[in-house]
Image (spheres, grey):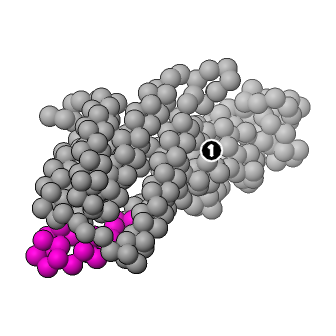
């Protein structure tokens, strides 16, 4: 049933629920002395921030293009993912520092209450993850928020494991050791999100796509003699743009229009590229064919 609820509403609801969980875990961590629980609370706080940020980015991305932002606000989602990735990395580093300090100077932990709080957090994390799990994997913004929630669910599992070990054996080092594991999981997720975000913001070729393969396919279209100045980049996840200069042998306007139609159809069908800017040029002077772009009017045939 949740699939019929708009993603914006699911993100807002998830942010509210995780905010309540964060408050409970902070209180529980302070009362029990559990670093693992406090580490998990820090991650949950960033979950709340990530979900709220993803909600705001999703709303912004729906706004239409303007005179100043001709692509619209699609990149806001990538920026939100970048911020989420950076906050994940910062939390991981903080957890590592605290855990190493606890390993050097172990502290007592109240395992029973720690278990109860962690179990409650796990239930909520799983519910939130279920709400978001049907998101589009190409939506880096929502995916980064989803990774926050999944990472926190794993953190709750780790806290529960540490609580059981301490309850049965009294070995309090299990608490900071589990914290290190939580930090590592968080850091790995952060690196993945940051890598993808930076790749998009630096206008890299979409993941899984080869610029060489695109160039070769364009060159193979009937009527095309040469391809140059090819650029393929990601505006936002799922929104790929392409520009290229294509030289054709037949200088007639009808031939140029036919080649252009074929190119757009091939690029959309085989590579999923719907936003294309292709300049058709004639072989003799490599000026743009009139009627399709400015320039080279003397080269145009009937």
Where does the image place residue 124, in percent across and percent down from the top left? 19, 46
* SS at mark 1 in the image: strand
Q: Residue at x 59, y 55 (%)?
A: 199
Residue 187 lies in the magenta stretch: no
Is residue 143 visible to the viewer in this orientation of the structure? Answer: no
Where does the image place residue 88, in percent across and percent down from the top left? 45, 55
Give the crowd class for mark 1: few <14, some 14-19, many >=20 residues within 10 Å.
Answer: some
The rendered magenta stretch, by its main secondary structure, is classed as: helix
- Left or right of 8? Residue 197 is right
Question: Of 224 and 126, which appears nearest the observer?
Answer: 126
User: Can you say whether 36 is above or below 77 in the image?
Assistant: below
Q: Residue at x 21, y 36 (%)?
A: 3
User: Can you say whether 30 is above or below 95 in the image?
Assistant: above
Magenta residues, start to end: 162-184
- Left or right of 208? Residue 71 is right
Residue bearing mark 1 = 242
- Left or right of 252? Residue 23 is left
Where does the image place residue 23, in percent across and percent down from the top left? 28, 42
Quadrant where the N terminus is found in the figure: top left
Quadrant where the C terminus is found in the figure: top right
The answer to which quarter of the image holds residue 291 is top right
Question: Of 216 and 229, which appears nearest the observer?
Answer: 229
Q: Residue at x 40, y 47 (%)?
A: 46
The answer to which quarter of the image holds residue 53 is top left
Is residue 235 visible to the viewer in this orientation of the structure? Answer: yes
Where does the image place residue 168, in percent across and percent down from the top left? 10, 76
User: Can you say whether 194 is above or below 61 in the image?
Assistant: below
Could you tell me how many numbered marks the image carries? 1
């Amino acid at each position: 049933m949740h699939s019929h609820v708009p993603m914006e509403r699911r993100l807002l609801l998830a942010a509210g629920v995780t905010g309540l969980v964060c408050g409970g875990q902070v209180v529980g961590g302070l009362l029990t002395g559990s670093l693992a629980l406090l580490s998990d609370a820090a991650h949950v706080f960033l979950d709340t921030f990530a979900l709220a940020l993803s909600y705001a980015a999703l709303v912004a991305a729906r706004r239409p293009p303007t005179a100043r932002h001709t692509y619209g606000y699609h990149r806001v989602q990538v920026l939100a993912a970048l911020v989420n990735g950076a906050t994940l990395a910062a939390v991981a580093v903080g957890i590592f520092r605290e855990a190493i300090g606890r390993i050097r100077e172990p502290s007592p932990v109240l395992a029973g209450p720690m278990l109860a709080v962690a179990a409650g957090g796990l239930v909520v994390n799983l519910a939130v993850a279920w709400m978001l799990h049907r998101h589009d994997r190409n939506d880096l913004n929502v995916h980064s928020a989803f990774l926050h929630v999944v990472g926190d669910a794993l953190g709750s599992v780790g806290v529960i494991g540490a609580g059981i070990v301490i309850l049965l054996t009294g070995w309090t080092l299990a608490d900071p050791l589990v914290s290190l594991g939580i930090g590592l999981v968080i850091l790995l997720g952060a690196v993945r999100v940051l890598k993808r975000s930076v790749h998009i913001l630096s206008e890299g070729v979409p993941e899984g796509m080869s610029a060489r393969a695109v160039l070769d396919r364009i060159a193979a279209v009937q009527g095309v003699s040469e391809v140059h100045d090819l650029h393929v980049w990601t505006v936002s996840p799922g929104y790929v743009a392409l520009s290229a200069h294509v030289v054709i042998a037949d200088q007639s306007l009808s031939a140029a229009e036919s080649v252009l139609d074929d190119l757009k159809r091939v690029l959309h069908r085989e590579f999923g590229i719907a936003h294309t800017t292709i300049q058709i040029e004639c072989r003799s002077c490599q000026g743009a064919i009139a009627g399709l772009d400015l320039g080279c009017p003397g080269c145009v045939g009937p």
